[in-house]
Amino acid sequence: MTSSRLRIGVPVSLSGRHARFGGQVRLGLEVWQSFHPAVELIVEDDHSEPRSLDVVLPRLAGQCDLLLGPYSTQLMRRAGRIGAALDMLIWNHGGSGDDVQAANPGHVVSVQTPAGRYAEPFVRRLAESGDRSPLRIVSGKGRFALQVAEGAARAAHAVGIPVVFGGPVDDSWNLFCAGAFDEDVEVVRRAGRARTICAVAAGVREFGAAVDDPRGIYGVGQWFPGGAGEVTFGLSEREFVAAYERRTGVPPNYIAVQGVAAAIIATYCAARAGGTGRAELWSAAAGLEAATLFGDFAIDPGTGLQTAHRAVLTRWESQGPVAVAA
């Protein structure tokens, strides 16, 4: 390593359309860093703009030993290309798109469930309840939303649930919507009569304040408190959640936890490899099967696609979201 003090560079959306969630990434990493004083975080605002990464990431690469990726599939798509051009490894915690995770083998390691598998727990719950009503899938703009929607359709077809894309929703249909936060909120507001609703946006706590009555709505997320078991290494879920709540007064969303998981795995792999070169980090990550506070971790050693982590299904109740077995 280049110095005794490990430096981690993080492009974060502190302004722009992703600032709501970029701030959570920074908070989560700062809480984690409080347990690791030998780690230095260097954070730069990417302004929620892909073109900002053209400046921010090379600058961070010149200053840091390890690089975490930005939040959002769109931003991570650009970051992966930049990482490959710089011959750096990007630890991806914020871009779930299937294409993003697999696009730059040897240069991107992903910790979260790919977009194409988001809907699996919701579809499985419908099937296990015996509900074979048609599933209307509404997709937002962009490739991430399309990949989530296509994954929902594949999962539904596999268990014999008919699928329709788009269109109006009435009380004879179940609904799954996949888009940006604001897109999902708008769809849910217009779909009051659907039988059962699941929205990607409902997987974060901000959803409860964005709709009139979230009760009964399912959400899909990457993590929910209480879901992680014993960790192979790093901070435990209990330790992190307690420290985060002491600082903020509220539990973390999965967005903060997946950023911390990327930092934990990155620093572990650096220690395991005895250095921070791209090839040695990749080799350490490709051979790793582990459990962190975020859940299981393993990647396809050929692409970097996450293979072990599973999405979590939640449902909104009077007291807030609760985890649902699926």
Image (cartoon, helix red, strand yellow):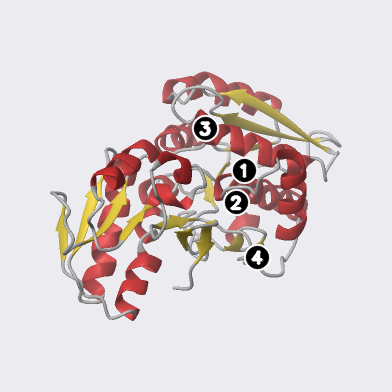
Q: Report which residue position mark 1 lands on.
A: 278
Looking at the image, is mark 2 or mark 4 earlier in the sequence? 2
Looking at the image, is mark 4 or mark 1 earlier in the sequence? 1
The disc at residue 282 is 2
User: Disc 4 vs disc 1: which is toward the camera?
Assistant: 4
- Please say if the residues under marks 2 and 4 sit with CB atoms less than 8 Å apart: no
Mark 4 is surrounded, within 10 Å at the Cα level, by few (under 14), some (14 to 19) or many (20 or more) other residues, namely many
Q: Whole-Å distance between the Cαs marked 3 and 2? A: 31 Å
Residue located at (47% from left, 23% from top): 16
Q: Report which residue position mark 4 lands on.
A: 291
Residue 250 vs residue 21: left or right? right
Residue 8 vs residue 294: left or right? right
Looking at the image, is mark 1 or mark 3 earlier in the sequence? 3
Q: Nearer the viewer, residue 108 or 224?
A: 224
Looking at the image, is mark 3 or mark 2 earlier in the sequence? 3
The disc at residue 20 is 3
